[in-house]
């Protein structure tokens, strides 16, 4: 009887616990917005590793180390699930950490690739250099639809542009046109945002990408997958969501300034220094 009571309390505790969402910076806000839309009862702990952004030009070893540091900390914060709202970590670290932590951990690539494979035959993927080099999207789309043709382009300048709030400066349109040109030359019917920062550039892309090209934002699919997983585990929240906790490793003022444009209310942001990894 006592045991059943304790188990029920534990489950209730997990139901109201937060979902941990992390990215190198403001990219993960595209996933957060989807959580607000699809899972309005869930509370979120958002971490942006802004002291070390961009991830996309770093080595696999660095990305794995940063991911472990974030997950160690999120476990201490007692999150009930972690969503890697970062394609670069999902491509290079997800498989390893999924077997290291006793926590459901979801990445964006598989759900995003499956959504693209369902919708398109000529698929362009734009992503960070590390994600492109990993070929994670090529593999995942190929497995889901072997008939689909896939081309990918690395776009190293996009993340610094977004993190520095330069989206609407004229050179952004020029750079975007240059990056996308080889994909448009292939007459793609579908474009995958292979980096969670990139949907923030949609107003720019819309200026020159033909309307028949479908945009796939893996944020939508990963949150749908998270909803299913919470349901299966019986840990979905039925209470009112608490306000999102925003934590960054860099300057909180800078993050607040940029993030405010995509959030319903200006975020309250705190800074932390992540302790080094405890997993070897
Ligand atoms: N937004 C992340 C991604 O999806 C990281 C980008 C970066 O820091 O380079 O890959």
Image (tube, rainbow, N blue to C red):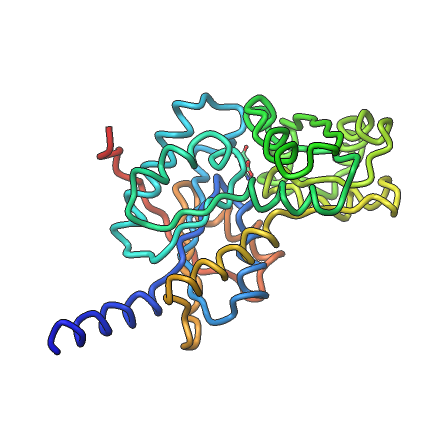
- Depth check: 197 or 78 in front? 78
Q: Is residue 43 left or right of residue 274?
A: right
* Picture residue at 80% right of the left edge, 29% below the top: 183
- Quadrant of residue 113 within the rendered picture: top right
Point out residue 131 in the picture as x, y percentages from the top left corner: 56, 29
Q: Which residue is rendered at x = 52% and y = 70% of the image?
A: 40
Answer left or right for 185 relative to 147. Answer: right
Judge left or right: residue 214 versus residue 248: right
Could you tell me which quadrant the N terminus lies in? bottom left
Could you tell me which quadrant the C terminus lies in?
top left
- In the depicted structure, whether residue 268 falls above or below residue 181: below
Residue 11 position in % (x across, y down): 28, 69
Vertical placement of residue 231 versus 212, above or below: below
Q: Position of residue 115 (x, y in %)?
A: 66, 47
Give the residue displayed 56% in from the left and 30% down from the top.
Answer: 136
| Among the 4 quarters of the image, the one containing residue 16 | bottom left
């Amino acid at each position: 009887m006592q045991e059943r009571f304790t188990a029920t309390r534990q489950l209730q505790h997990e139901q109201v616990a937060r979902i941990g969402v992390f990215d190198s910076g403001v990219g993960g806000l595209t996933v957060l917005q989807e959580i607000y839309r699809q899972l309005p009862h869930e509370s979120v702990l958002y971490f942006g590793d802004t002291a070390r952004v961009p991830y996309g030009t770093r080595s696999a070893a660095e990305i794995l180390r940063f991911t472990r540091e974030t997950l160690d900390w999120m476990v201490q914060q007692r999150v009930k699930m972690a969503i890697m709202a970062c394609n670069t970590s999902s491509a290079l670290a997800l498989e390893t950490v999924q077997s290291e932590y006793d926590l459901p951990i979801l990445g964006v690539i598989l759900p995003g690739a499956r959504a693209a494979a369902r919708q398109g035959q000529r698929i362009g993927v734009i992503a960070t250099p590390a994600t492109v080099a990993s070929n994670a999207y090529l593999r995942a789309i190929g497995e889901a639809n072997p008939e689909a043709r896939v081309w990918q382009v690395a776009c190293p300048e996009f993340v610094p542009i977004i993190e520095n709030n330069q989206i609407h400066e004229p050179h952004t349109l020029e750079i975007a046109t240059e990056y996308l040109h080889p994909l448009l030359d292939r007459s793609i019917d579908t474009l995958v945002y292979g980096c969670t920062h990139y949907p923030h550039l949609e107003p720019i892309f819309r200026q020159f990408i033909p309307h028949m090209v479908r945009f796939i934002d893996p944020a939508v699919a990963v949150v749908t997958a998270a909803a299913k997983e919470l349901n299966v585990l019986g840990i979905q929240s039925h209470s009112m969501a608490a306000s999102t906790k925003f934590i960054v490793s860099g300057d909180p003022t800078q993050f607040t300034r940029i993030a405010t444009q995509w959030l319903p209310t200006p975020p309250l942001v705190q800074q932390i220094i992540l302790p080094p990894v405890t997993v070897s």
